[in-house]
Image: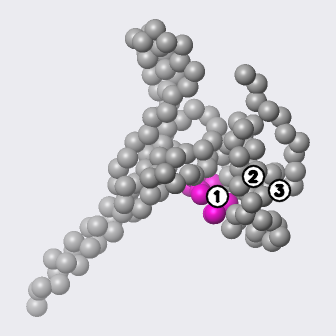
Amino acid sequence: MSKRIIKSSKQRDLILRILRSTKSHPTADWVYDQARKEMPKISKATVYRNLNLLKEEGKIRECTICKGIIRYDGDVRLHYHIRCIECGRIDDVPIVTSVVCTEEVAKLSGYIVLSHHLDFTGICSKCQEKEKERINKKSGAGRD
């Protein structure tokens, strides 16, 4: 099954550049806001349409690990994600065991594995720090 090749456009090139310049796994609305800084007349519909085309071409990935909210990733290499259950932040997981995992699953299951998706959840360092600050304020509030 070959990927559809679509003629390039200024809008699509801008959207791809925006996604490849961030590690934040943004929403379409964030991409739209960033695109408007450089191309003020771009419409939200154009951004959504081009995100879908870029996804079809395999130039970006869609991430839906955050309570049904679709986010986009400009890094199409096989990698994992971790999502903070407090703030919804998504980060890449810096491990490279995906090939070993895929080969092991293929061997154990008898399947030819075409792809896989593995996501982690937790609490990011910023949310952990906020919680520590909240606890410290709460414990110090009753002292005189």
Q: Is mark 3 on a helix, strand or loop?
A: helix
Q: Is mark 2 on a helix, strand or loop?
A: helix
**Which residue is drawn at the image coordinates 44% and 52% (left, top)?**
67
Q: Which amino acid does label 2 sit on?
A: Arg
Q: Is residue 83 magenta?
A: no
Question: Distance from label 1 to label 2 (Cα)?
Answer: 10 Å
Foreground mark, 1 or 2, reads 2
Residue identified by numbered label 1: 28
Question: What x and y, as percent, mark residue 63?
Answer: 55, 45
Question: What x and y, as percent, mark residue 5?
Answer: 83, 34
State which tag comes first along the sequence, 1 or 3: 3
Instruction: Kindly identify which numbered label has been placed on residue 11.
Output: 3
- Looking at the image, is 26 positioned above or below residue 79? below
Question: Distance from label 1 to label 3 (Cα)?
Answer: 14 Å
**Which residue is drawn at the image coordinates 71% and 50% (left, top)?**
51
Start-end of magenta stretch? 22-31
Question: What x and y, as percent, mark residue 61?
Answer: 63, 42
